[in-house]
């Protein structure tokens, strides 16, 4: 690119010097445009040195790369609808003569269709020549105008849908690329350093290095969780955190319920043991009481009266 720009600038400069800046043909206009576009492109290229501009340029270029297929599909649809309009002999609506310098009905129809997609009011109508031919046949004129109106409605609905689709893919591409921009920025800087190293090495002796060691902080994961990485990614992290909190609460509730169940089981076991001991104690008291009862004559059989008997 640098060589082509240098050659184009050399040819342009030589032509201007030979013509004393008086002639400016079509070829020179195109050559000047080519040089100017390359200058703008190189300006954007070297703006990557600055972090803020590098982020914007990297993000813009990658988003445009992702939207190329949809843009090509929309452009093909635009050409297709324009051709259908031309076949149906739709009229060109140009009250301000804005398309007087555009040669060819197809190009005029293409620009009119594009204006319609941008919100300009274009009323479906027949071309002047076709309208004159069908003056004697109102039914044919009505049918043809109805077909044009139907295609006009379909075209507006079609491009409205794909306008929303374009915005959706734009936001999706931004949300997808934003979390990766830090890594992509480092990759872009590395590529830029390699290119500059090869140029500077021709004029200055550069320091040699064999390896570069990167240290990763242990808190990097926590910082990533707190960092804004786009709406979708941030919402996903928030939902994951909420789900983790709910999972921890469920684990705590389960452990607490298990502890309560174990305590209840131990309490029931203690009550059962107390009931069994009470039953045994009652049986022992009944046996002792039965052994201390007097016979029919009231004689204790030489046995001593215990305190309970005396009572």
Image: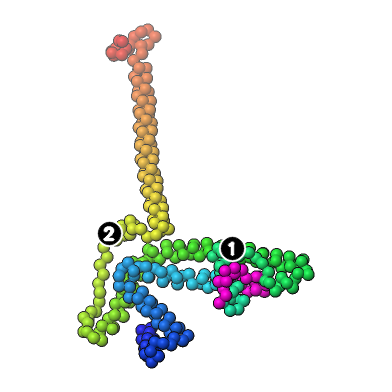
> In what quadrant of the picture does the N terminus appear?
bottom left
Residue 219 is labelled as: 2
- Where residue 296 sits: x, y (%)? 39, 9
Neighbor class of circle 1 (other Cα within 10 Å; few <14, some 14-19, many 20+) is few
Tell whether 67 sits left or right of 311. Answer: right
Neighbor class of circle 2 (other Cα within 10 Å; few <14, some 14-19, many 20+) is few
Q: Quadrant of residue 291?
A: top left
- Residue 74 in magenta stretch: no
SS label for mark 2:
loop
Name the one closer to the observer, 130 or 58. 130
Reading the image, the residue beneath label 1 is 121
Answer with mark 2 or mark 1, whichever residue precedes in sequence: 1
SS label for mark 1:
loop
Tell whether 195 sits left or right of 296. Answer: left
Task: Report the mark closest to the observer, 2 or 1.
Answer: 1
- Where residue 218 sits: x, y (%)? 27, 61
**Residue at 37 percent of width and 79 percent of height:** 39
Q: Quadrant of residue 309?
A: top left
């Amino acid at each position: 690119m640098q060589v082509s720009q240098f050659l184009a600038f050399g040819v342009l400069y030589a032509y201007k010097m030979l013509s004393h800046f008086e002639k400016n043909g079509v070829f020179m206009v195109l050559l000047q445009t080519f040089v100017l576009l390359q200058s703008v492109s190189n300006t954007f290229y070297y703006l990557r040195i600055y972090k803020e501009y590098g982020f914007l340029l990297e993000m813009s270029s990658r988003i445009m790369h992702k939207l190329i297929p949809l843009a090509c599909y929309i452009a093909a649809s635009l050409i297709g609808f324009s051709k259908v309009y031309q076949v149906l002999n739709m009229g060109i609506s140009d009250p301000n003569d804005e398309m007087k310098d555009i040669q060819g009905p197809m190009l005029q129809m293409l620009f009119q269709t594009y204006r319609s997609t941008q919100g300009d009011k274009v009323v479906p109508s027949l071309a002047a020549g076709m309208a004159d031919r069908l003056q004697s046949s109102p039914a044919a004129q009505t049918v043809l105008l109805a077909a044009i109106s139907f295609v006009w409605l379909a075209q507006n609905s079609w491009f409205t849908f794909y306008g929303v689709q374009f915005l959706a893919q734009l936001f999706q591409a931004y949300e997808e690329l934003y979390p990766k921009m830090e890594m992509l920025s480092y990759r872009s800087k590395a590529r830029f350093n390699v290119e500059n190293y090869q140029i500077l090495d021709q004029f200055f002796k550069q320091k040699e290095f064999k390896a570069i060691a990167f240290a990763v902080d242990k808190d990097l994961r926590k910082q990533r969780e707190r960092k804004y990485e786009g709406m979708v990614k941030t919402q996903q992290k928030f939902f994951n955190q909420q789900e983790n909190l709910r999972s921890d609460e469920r684990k705590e509730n389960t452990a607490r319920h298990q502890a309560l169940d174990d305590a209840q089981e131990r309490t029931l076991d203690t009550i059962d043991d107390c009931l069994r001991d009470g039953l045994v104690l009652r049986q022992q008291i009944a046996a002792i009481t039965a052994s201390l009862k007097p016979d029919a004559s009231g004689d204790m059989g030489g046995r001593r009266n215990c305190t309970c008997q005396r009572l």
